[in-house]
Image: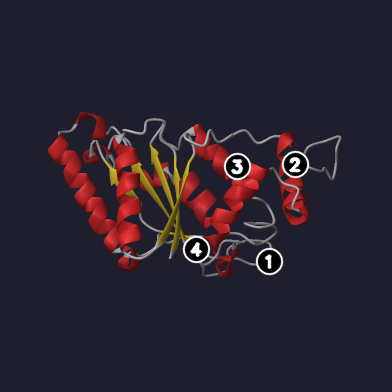
Amino acid sequence: MNVLIVHAHPEPQSFTTAMKDLAVQELSNAGHQVEVSDLYAMNFNPVASAADFGSRKNPDYLVYALEQRINYENQTIAPDIAAEIEKLVAADLVIFSFPLYWFSIPAILKGWIDRVLVSGLTYGGKRFYDQGGLKGKKALLSFTLGGREHMFGADAIHGEIETMLRPVLRGTLYYVGMDVLPPFIGYHVPYISPEARQQILEDYKQYLQNLDQLQPLEFPTLDQFDDKLYPKKGEH
């Protein structure tokens, strides 16, 4: 496979970075081609703006998604976006590596999503969910957090982790057509022993070695809905 790791942690010595480095090593050793976009090291600009476009369909009023589509087609989109799109298009698997911030992803990673998952290429019209533009690719979240594992679940204090991350898992990755693999999570990382951290790395190694056996998360498909996107009778 061609693997793209989009890494978003400001500290090169962090445990999240150690997880990213392990993924690079394990996947490379398995014969995969691995490329890393280290967003902080790249000083990636997360701000979506008119500066992203070399030309404008409407110079007087910015409709960002419309300008994305036209500038991508005309190859006039900002060079930093074009470079990331090239990596994304080549990838069979995209790993998003980050620490959980406020039940979500870091702003720099959200900015990568906003700017790189361009209209026209990744979605548009009824090209979304299982018919999205990145259909056939896989994605997974690999992240760390401070909470303990028992704090997440149906009756737990924070609720279910997949519900918490629904805007990313369903509203972003699945929306553009990717098969979303179950996330890998490093729990309670700031507070655990070196031995416990080593165990997380061992678990992640096993996870990466068994990617082909992971079942993607299940979401609705467009064929369960009619032309106006009402649920078909009998579909649940």
Name which residue lies at 21% across and 29% down: 191
SS under mark 3: helix
What kind of residue is marked 3?
A: Asp
Give the alpha-carbon distance from disc 4 to disc 2, as whole Å: 27 Å
| Disc number lying in front (4 or 2) | 2
In the picture of the structure, the residue carrying the numbered disc 3 is 114
Query: Which callout, 4 or 3, points at the residue further toward the start of the chain?
Result: 3
Query: Which callout, 4 or 2, points at the residue further toward the start of the chain?
Result: 2
In the picture of the structure, the residue carrying the numbered disc 4 is 137
SS under mark 4: loop
Residue 179 x/y as whole percent = 46, 62
Query: Which callout, 1 or 2, points at the residue further toward the start of the chain?
Result: 2
Query: Which callout, 1 or 3, points at the residue further toward the start of the chain?
Result: 3
Question: For the residue carrying disc 3, how many other residues have a C-alpha within 10 Å: few (<14), some (14-19), or many (20+)?
Answer: some
What kind of residue is marked 1?
A: Asp
Against 203, residue 80 (above or below) is above
| Disc number lying in front (1 or 2) | 2
Is there any visible trace of residue 56 in the rendered image?
A: yes
| Disc number lying in front (3 or 2) | 2
Query: Which callout, 3 or 2, points at the residue further toward the start of the chain?
Result: 2
Quarter assignment of residue 111: top right
